[in-house]
Amino acid sequence: MKKSNFKKTMENLTNNRHIHLQKLIGKSFEELNVLKERSYSGYKTAEVTGYTEGYELHYLSYSIIDEAIQIKHGNEEQAWDYLT
């Protein structure tokens, strides 16, 4: 039985989360916030329309982007503490 594109994408995001986080952390906060807003909008739209797969995919993407923002924010705070 073949896996659906949805399942492949979800597995890719889940299994390669650390790689995605590394790429995201390299982006600016402005870029991350734009991506986060797009994912949030996507999962809210999918939730309202009842598109379960879309909801799950956008929510996972949103959570990875949010995690990258938190990590990046924490790293900048640690760097600032070190400098002061």
Image (spheres, rainbow, N blue to C red):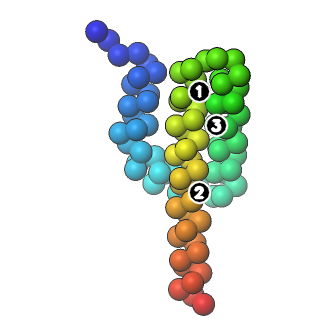
Residue 50: x %, y % from top left = 64, 17
Residue 76: x %, y % from top left = 58, 72
Q: Is 68 situated above or below 47?
A: below
Quarter of the rendering occupied by the C terminus:
bottom right
Question: Which one is earlier in the sequence, the residue at label 1 or at label 3?
Answer: 3
Residue 83: x %, y % from top left = 57, 87
Q: Is residue 29 visible?
A: yes
In the displayed structure image, the side of residue 6 where residue 51 appears, left or right: right
Q: Which residue is drawn at 52% across and 37% down?
A: 60
Q: Is residue 26 visible?
A: no
Label 1 Cα crowd, 10 Å radius (few <14 / some 14-19 / many 20+): many
The residue labelled by disc 3 is 39
Q: Is 5 situated above or below 75?
A: above
Front position in the image: 28 or 12: 12
Give residue 69's mark. 2
Q: Residue at x 65, y 44 (%)?
A: 36
Question: Which one is earlier in the sequence, the residue at label 2 or at label 1?
Answer: 1
Label 3 Cα crowd, 10 Å radius (few <14 / some 14-19 / many 20+): many
Give residue 55's mark. 1
Quarter of the rendering occupied by the N terminus:
top left
Give residue 43's mark. none
Label 2 Cα crowd, 10 Å radius (few <14 / some 14-19 / many 20+): many
Q: Disc 3 marks which amino acid?
A: Ser
Element type at mark 3 = helix
In the displayed structure image, the side of residue 24 where residue 50 appears, left or right: right
Q: Which residue is drawn at 59% across and 27% down?
A: 55
